[in-house]
Amino acid sequence: MDAGLTLAPRQDLGAAPRLRDWFLAQDGDARIDATAVEIVTTPALQVLISGSDMIRRKGHRFEVACPSAAFTRCLADLGCTLSRLTEGPRPEGRA
């Protein structure tokens, strides 16, 4: 992995610009460490989805290291999964 970012406990609207700027600066494989994350809100999740998609479109890998239980639960509450972030959307008609 070329670049890593350790996420703060609260990933919300206030964290979204920093997260966006980090994604825009990436030019290779990228990893976030979600060990300490306690909350993820919709604005931060939107940046995570679009940023991880951008990394993969460039032909690189995106990884979520050590996702906390709260991080995974917040994603699920917002209708997202870890695999959506790391692998992208599933083709239509596939569960």
Image: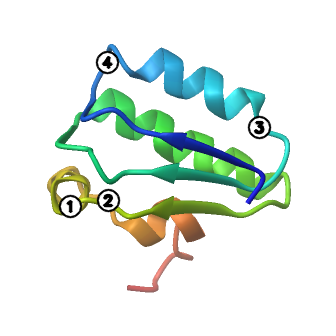
Amino acid at circle 1: Ala
Q: Earlier in the sequence, mark 4 or mark 2?
A: 4
x and y percentages locating residue 48 in the rendered image: 48, 42
Residue ID for mark 3: 26
Q: Can you say which quadrant of the picture contains the C terminus? A: bottom left
Residue ID for mark 1: 76
x and y percentages locating residue 24 in the rendered image: 72, 28
Q: Quadrant of residue 76?
A: bottom left
- Report helix, strand or loop for mark 2: loop
Q: Earlier in the sequence, mark 4 or mark 3?
A: 4
In 3D space, how far apart are the residues under numbered discs 4 and 3 (Cα atoms)?
21 Å
Q: Earlier in the sequence, mark 2 or mark 3?
A: 3
Residue at image x 73%, y 58%? 56
In 3D space, how far apart are the residues under numbered discs 2 and 1 (Cα atoms)?
5 Å
Residue ID for mark 4: 13
Q: How many marks?
A: 4
Image-based side of 11 in relation to 70, left or right: right
